[in-house]
Image (tube, rainbow, N blue to C red):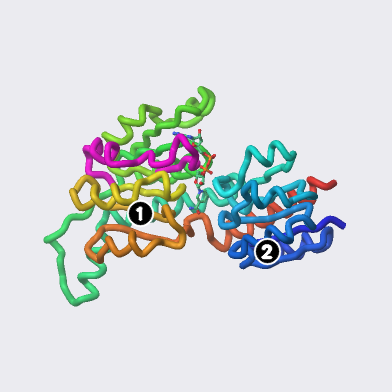
Amino acid sequence: MKNILITEFMNEDSIAILRKNFNVKYDLNLYKDEEQIKKEISNFEVIIVRNKTQLKKTILDNALKLKLIGRLGVGLDNIDKKYCEKKNIHIQTAKGMNSDSVAEYVIGSSLYLIKNINFFNSETKKGLWPRSSFTSNELKDKILGLIGFGDISKKVFRLAKNFGAKVISYDPYVDAKLKKEFNVIFTTFDEVIETSNIISIHIPLNNETKNLINSNVFDKMKQKPILINTSRGSIVNENDLINAYKNKKLSGFALDVFEKEPIDESFYKKIDDSFNCILTPHISGVTEESNKRISEFIANKIIHFFD
Ligand code: NAD
């Protein structure tokens, strides 16, 4: 029997399916102990991770039997892809399996922020009644700019259309067939930045996208947009974001991902209750439903891999 090591949380029903075919070691906190993973990994043909386990060269050098990495999610910034290719280790992601969860989060936070719910909620809880001293807006007829047009953006597009928003996107890698299939206006990065009322980021973190949204880009935002980042923290420069908000270049922001996770004190201390913002601990793709879907998908892929 082949051996599987699982270092982060996985749906128990899917683990039970794997146990019928494999020896499984499941320790949902193992990702915290890099030295232990380094010691143990040589015994396993498969490792299953989320985004916390760092599978870099120093660890993979010890992975003498490893054939397959199951990634319970999409982003691969915690895995040395090139090194895996060289060592012939296959990486299986759960692409598309949590895109509904993230897309709902994007629409939910867009509505929450554009309607200034944070402010109205906290004032009303204090017994105040600010009916006319603050404004609220509609998603209808607003321009929603999507940076990247992959699985998540496609779902966001469909939901946003139901609200009557106009969707534009920047993605230099989409092909003509996809452009035809979706009635989206594909345009330049600058046009998305300059004209959107809401900007939502759906791209991988890599050398090209690191620090993509920085002070120069915030300076080009003409519509005082809302910024939503569910992709990876380092795509948005957090210092520049706070400055942009304080200088009224942004009217709100929702961050589900951060440069440092768990969130760093030096960042969250800059934010007070008056900010029109939402901060969440990297959960936009994690719902009960998506957890089940992702785990089942990866378990089945692993079983078929060794068929
Ligand atoms: P995807 O691979 O389906 O789509 C990514 C899109 O980005 C592609 O269409 C690609 O052409 C485009 N792209 C790549 N580089 C670009 C660039 N420089 N400029 C513009 N477009 C570019 O991925 P997805 O499923 O839509 O997910 C997007 C990202 O969201 C993932 O990489 C992952 O890091 C993140 N994610 C986060 C969560 C969460 O819980 N917060 C959950 C799922 C995914």
Residue 228 position within the rendered picture, expressed as x and y whole percent measured from the top left: 37, 49
| Quarter of the image with the N terminus in it | bottom right
Vertical placement of residue 97 versus 81, above or below: below
> Distance from label 2 to label 1 (Cα)?
35 Å
Which residue type carries mark 2?
Gln
Give the mark toward the camera: 2 or 1.
2
Residue sitting nearer the eye, 9 or 149: 9
**Residue 178 pos. (x, y %):** 52, 28
Circle 1 crowding by C-alpha within 10 Å: few under 14, some 14–19, many from 20 = many
| Residue 48 falls left or right of residue 4 | left
Q: Main secondary structure of the magenta part?
A: loop
Residue located at (31% from left, 52% from top): 253
Q: Is residue 141 visible?
A: no
Question: Within 10 angstroms of label 2, few (less than 14), some, or many (20 or more) residues?
Answer: few
Q: Are marks 2 and 1 in contact (CB under 8 Å)?
A: no
The residue positioned 33% from the left and 47% from the top of the image is 227
Q: Against 188, is 138 above or below?
A: below
- For label 1, the SS is strand
- Which residue sits at x=77%, y=61%? 17
Judge left or right: residue 74 versus residue 196: right
Secondary element type, mark 2: helix
Give residue 186's mark. none
Residue at label 1?
Answer: 254
Query: In the displayed structure, would residue 85 be above or below residue 185?
Result: below
The amino acid at mark 1 is: Ala
Residue matched to label 2: 36
Image spot of residue 231 (x, y percent):
46, 47
At which x and y percent is residue 107? 39, 51
Left or right, 167 with reference to 76? left
Magenta-highlighted residues: 201-225
Is residue 172 something one can see in this rendering? yes
The quarter of the picture where residue 35 lies is bottom right
